[in-house]
Amino acid sequence: MNNLALEILELQGARFVEIMPGTKRPQGTGWQHNPRTLDGIHTPAVGMLLGDASAGIMAVDFDGASAIEYWAEHIMDSVPDTVMWASGRAGRFQAAYRVPEEIRALVPTKFAHNTGQGEQLEWRYGRDSAGFQSVLPPSIHPELGTEYYWLEGMSPLDREVAECPVELLEWAFEQTKRRDVAVTVNTPMNTTSDSISEANALRKIAELIAGMAPGNRSTPACQVGALMRHVRGELHGEIFLRLIAAGCDKSAISSAKKYSQMM
């Protein structure tokens, strides 16, 4: 397939699937495990694999006007500029963001939050065990009969896929935490032989992060990682987010992750 906008998206790490013409469904079986570059796409309709297969590119699906209102009220005031596309249905569009490499293994896969009657805000991220894709321009919408299109000024020709806002990541972790509450209650806390309480570990983690200064983040990040061994796994994602917000670079995050897994 020759398409300059998609070629630029491919250079940013995006990988694709063939879409069965007249539908929104991927063509063939095993497409989740068969990411393709554009030269392997031979159908007029194309979808982008989301998540790990596309270098961490995920999509937020705004499915209705109430989803946009919900975003402004519960996540952040406006939708940060990034690559965006739509089908032509009023109040409906998708926005692509890249999840930082250090926390890709921690973020949730696809889920939706109902925002109104028949409307929702959907987080879309995929892995080998749960592959997802979004149909892209210039595919034809099977019901409307018109082409998907890039929002004005938001095509890959205009801008790169933006980094996922911290506010969106925090919302995603919070939403999945609520969905997993029944499991969480029955999950034993990770401990080591020199066990300290989870509450004390979280307090010390908060103190370390609050005290981080420019140029002095690697050592406290390692200390945070060590303390994370006393904290339930489902809380680790939020701690990594706090480290990122505190200015930790990739090396410091990697160190924290390594120490959190040491026994």
Image (cartoon, helix red, strand yellow):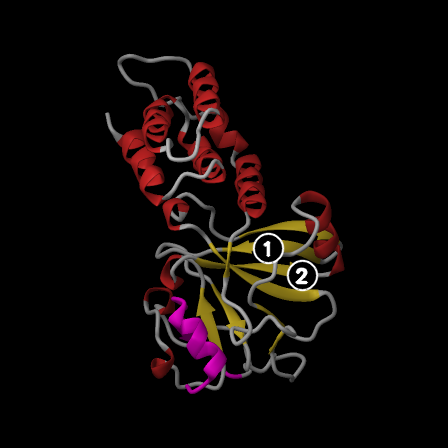
Give the residue displayed 54% in from the left and 81% down from the top.
139
Give the residue displayed 46% in from the left and 24% down from the top.
211
Horizontal side of 86 relative to 199 (left or right) equals: right
Residue 122, which numbered label? 1
SS for dot 1: strand
The boundaries of the magenta stretch are: 1-21
The quarter of the picture where residue 130 lies is bottom left
Q: Amino acid at mark 1?
A: Glu
Question: Residue 102 at what x, y percent from top left?
Answer: 37, 45
Q: Is residue 15 visible?
A: no
Q: Nearer the viewer, residue 161 or 210?
A: 210
Question: Residue 93 at what x, y percent from top left?
Answer: 64, 66
| Residue, disc 2 | 63
Question: Residue 162 at what x, y percent from top left?
Answer: 51, 59
Residues at circles 2 and 1 in contact by the CB criterion of under 8 Å: yes
Residue 4, which numbered label? none
Q: Amino acid at mark 2?
A: Asp
SS for dot 2: strand
Q: Earlier in the sequence, mark 2 or mark 1?
A: 2
Q: Nearer the viewer, residue 10 or 231?
A: 10
Q: Is residue 3 magenta?
A: yes
Q: Is residue 58 magenta?
A: no
Question: Residue 42 at what x, y percent from top left?
Answer: 39, 86
Question: Whole-Å distance between the Cαs marked 2 and 1?
Answer: 8 Å
Q: Is residue 92 visible?
A: yes
**Up/down of 143 relative to 103, above or below:** below
Circle 2 Cα neighbour tier, 10 Å, few/some/many (<14 / 14–19 / ≥20): many
